[in-house]
Amino acid sequence: MATSTIGENVTAVRRRSFSESYIGEWLTTVDHKKIGLMYIVTGFFFFLVGGMEALLIRAQLARPNGQVLDPNTYNEVFTMHGTTMIFLFVIPVLAGFGNYIVPLMIGARDMAFPRMNAFGYWVMLFGGVFLQSSFLVGQAPNGGWFMYAPLSEMAAGCGHGFQCTTGMNADFWILGTTLLGISSISGSLNFVVTIFRLRAPGMSINRMPLFSWMILVMSFLLLFALPSLTVASVLLLLDRHAGTHFYQYANGGDPLLWQHLFWSFGHPEVYILILPAFGIISEVLPVFSRKPIFGYTFIAWSGVAIGFLSFTVWAHHMFAVGLPAIAQAFFATSTTLIAIPTAVKIFNWIATVVGGKISFKVPMLFALGFIAMFLIGGLNGAALAVVPFDYQITDSYFVVAHIHYVLFGGTALGIFAGLYYWFPKFSGKVLNERLGQVHFWLTLIGLNLTFFPMHLLGILGMPRRVYTFPDSLGWNELNLLASIGAFIIGISVLVFLWNVVTTLKNAEKASTDPWDAFTLEWDTSSPPKKYNFLEIPIVRSRRPFYDKKYPENADWKSPLSVH
Amino acid sequence: MRMPVFRRTKRWLVLLSCLLLSSIILAACGENSPSILNTAGPVASNETFLFWVILIISSIVFVAVEGALVFSIVRYRERPGTPNPRQVHGNLTLEILWTAIPTLALFVVLFFTIRGLVQVSPDAEPADANKVTVTAIGHQWWWEFHYPQYNVTTADTLHVPAGTVIHVNLFTNNVIHSFWVPALTGKTDLIPGHNNTKWFIANSDDVGKTYTGLCAEYCGTQHANMRFEVQVDSTDGFQTWITSQKQQAVAPAAGSLAAQGEDIFKGAGACSGCHGIVGVNAQNFVDTSVVCNDSDPAHLSGQDCPVGPNLTHFGSRHLIAGGVLVNNKDQCDPNDPNLMQDCNLAKWLYDPGSIKPGNDMASSIAKGQLTNDQIKALVAYLESLN
Amino acid sequence: MSQEQQDQEQIQVQDAAAEEEEEGRAASLPASSNASTAANTPASEQTEDEPRVLKKRVKRKGRLVNVDEVLPRPSFWPVVLALALALFCFGFIWNKYVLFLGLALFVVAAIGWVLERR
């Protein structure tokens, strides 16, 4: 490493010509920051795709007997909306934040495996293109993002009287999610090794910023949850094309096997989607309250507790399948338990704000909005754990309301908080405050207008995944409200895009530390140099950059802090 | 900077509360909704009771936590000259306190959950000498109901006697469906190879009422149009209905329009390929959950295991086409010149694919394949089958 | 910025020995003594080799090296390998020739990845 021979310089020169061209540079990069940006931009592109799919859904359901989409197209669109948002928006964008920010936060020069990192990104991109290309051949997946067997089967006896998936629709989904799984596995391994091995001197695991903590937990969850999905998918692929009968009861298989395998991935998955957002919030709240995070240890370890418990709650998606009462009681209990660490986090966030000096910059608005909305998602989630009540509202629009309060009111607001917060790091420019406020309020109003009525629709008996509804059942007005809200969210996203474009074009260069932040990623230039830190910093507390800027108040001098 | 933010917060709060109020008012308008709040039996009442429990607890938590959040946002906003806050890192007592309080609240909920779970589980089904057993069979995309005690099969409408325990066997040999009558009972899935059961009771003072039932598990193209209804009869009314349903089909008068309809029905490759009528092309009602017990393709067609619903007493049914259309008999006079516009059955026979795209009948009958005369004859025949 | 410019830049690199030296320096400050013992787990693996630590402590704490020496070089094999996987999947849906093309490309990319000099 230390010596450089003439031969090496020659190869470097030759390669430079390839990677110097604009496209070549992005194609061949192994720089965690470039890869992180590509993840975020790609993920956001798929957010727009998934958003268009959502608007199609809401356009179809705005009025009873809607004629916007035919039933089969509607089923494809709602399947792809879920699949896109989960696998192609949330996971990539969070992986992008992780890629960009984690090495900077922990004082590393790059991820542990830079090429595998690049590989993970490209597999994700091609997997996404592969999945969406199914629309071009008119065979988009149409079995729901949960792809229940035997509807997704291509079995003997399929056809008259038993309509399953005879086209390639389900194969697109199986192969596409497997590709995305490969991407997530390589990304997660990389995060785990990076976080365990490449921390700056002095940054012990309990001084690590909470975002890195949550990325670590997320990575472990992905590593342990994804194999279950891969196994389920491969078995389904074999059923469909190799004549096996894993999910075909007529031949000795069991359709419930799919549900158990799928949800033992699917529930950790939900926490995979929300934990990094918890991390973002735990970074943003202290900075804009001018206080350290309240109860660092509790927030970090409640994340770990959620991670462990998330593997024990999968069958709460299956209360209606007729499990024995004792099994249902077990899963009701584990679901109750997992709510406790989540509640602890919310209290700690509020306590972080209390006693602070709150500045209402846009990242903070989104972070506060996150707490307010995620609380609703938590409460209606707890309602779903009440098994007998769950019999009534599972698979109704109430569940749609719940998942969107968690994933839109939670994760998406968290992602926006992160985008506004770290945008100066990515680009050197601060996003426009005024447009950001418009974006925030439109999002908040739009999301409540869209998703709150869905609670009521569920209570009024509207099932999920219906492409139409008759006008006689009293669901008309609430559906119209929800559709109006969805289009308001659509407008808010346009405002955000406009903000990004005009900021990049017109805004002046900001300082490297516009928020007076606490963590190491701000102790670099914006955007950071390829090597991140000229000199790897030495960490003495949980807020190394704060210590550096305010040496007289440094955390490691304070008797109050654990450092 | 800070003032506009707060004026907007207030405006937003007003907006949000207007939204909440208006949606509740709108919700009240939905009188015909299959709402889980208008319960008509003990099982659903148990389940809905838990809704009120969790609603009260969540409302308290919601107000307390959102209140704390809003209060601290307002109280601790940055004002000119605010000093830097004290750098507080945590407090163990508080942490223990706010771990314990939600734990307690959640365990209160858990107590109600498990109590309710035991009350409505299949094991809790009360003994009842008059218990009526029904096999609910999920097809793509319609419901068939077989009464094994009486050997009667019907579709789209489940008749039940009031005040009696109804034991439901849930059967499907295709994909997964879910049986849901919000007013009477929550969901249980129909899963191939799993003998799920459930039970419910319709209140005895609700005789004559009907309740909407829905398929609640995504089951393919027409999942949205897989509804049924539960008709609550008096005990005597139920027996009368059963007696009439046990009869063979009424034979039409020779030479009448209905007799022509019967001939069309019986024709080779026509309706009788998928539908059975007892006394015409079938000997008996069959319990498809017994005869179609595997998904051997040979079983899925023909007389043994008809693909479509049994039509023996078609004229007496309230719903047709998998619960999508009302059987408006009064509009179905074959001599009515507006038959094709007004009569739902005629519309269904003319183009089943536009009413329910993708259904099996649409793959047999293309739009306009039946002439208007054939449709008239079939309408006359089918509506005569009381 | 162009590659040329980056190559000009010299960054300070700490190898394992330098980190140990760092630890020794920090330990001399009383206020942070507990901090440095709690931390630095990766480096502490090597502290068992006591004599070496003592020897390195007198060394300079870092040295200036070229960017390209510490940071991995760009490589196009990751994108090729990913493309191979995608072609494999497209081939599964559409055309078996594409599937075999994907397989072949996968082998080529894997070999290329392994053999490329870092």
Image (cartoon, rainbow, N blue to C red):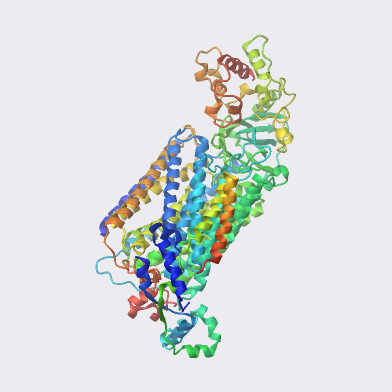
In the image, residue B151 lies at what x, y percent?
Answer: 73, 30
| Picture residue at 45% right of the left edge, 37% below the top | A60
Q: Looking at the rendering, in which quadrant would you find the N terminus of chain B? A: bottom left
Q: Judge whether C8 appears above or below C80 on screen.
A: below
Q: Is residue B367 left or right of residue B153?
A: left
Q: Is residue A387 above or below residue A280?
A: above
Residue A270 visible, this orientation? no
x and y, in percent, of residue A430 in the image: 31, 61
The image position of residue B377, as x and y in percent, is 60, 15
Q: Position of residue A124 (x, y in %)?
A: 50, 55
- Residue A80 in view: yes
Q: Is residue A66 above or below residue B376?
A: below
- Residue B133 falls left or right of residue C85: right
From the viewer's side, name the closer residue of B44 and A304: A304
Decide which of A314, B75 is in the foreground and name it.
A314
Q: Residue at x 43, y 35 (%)?
A: A63
Relative horizontal placement of residue A228, taking residue A32 as reference (left or right): right
Q: Is residue A181 above or below residue B202?
A: below
Which corner quadrant of the image does residue A10 belong to?
A: bottom left
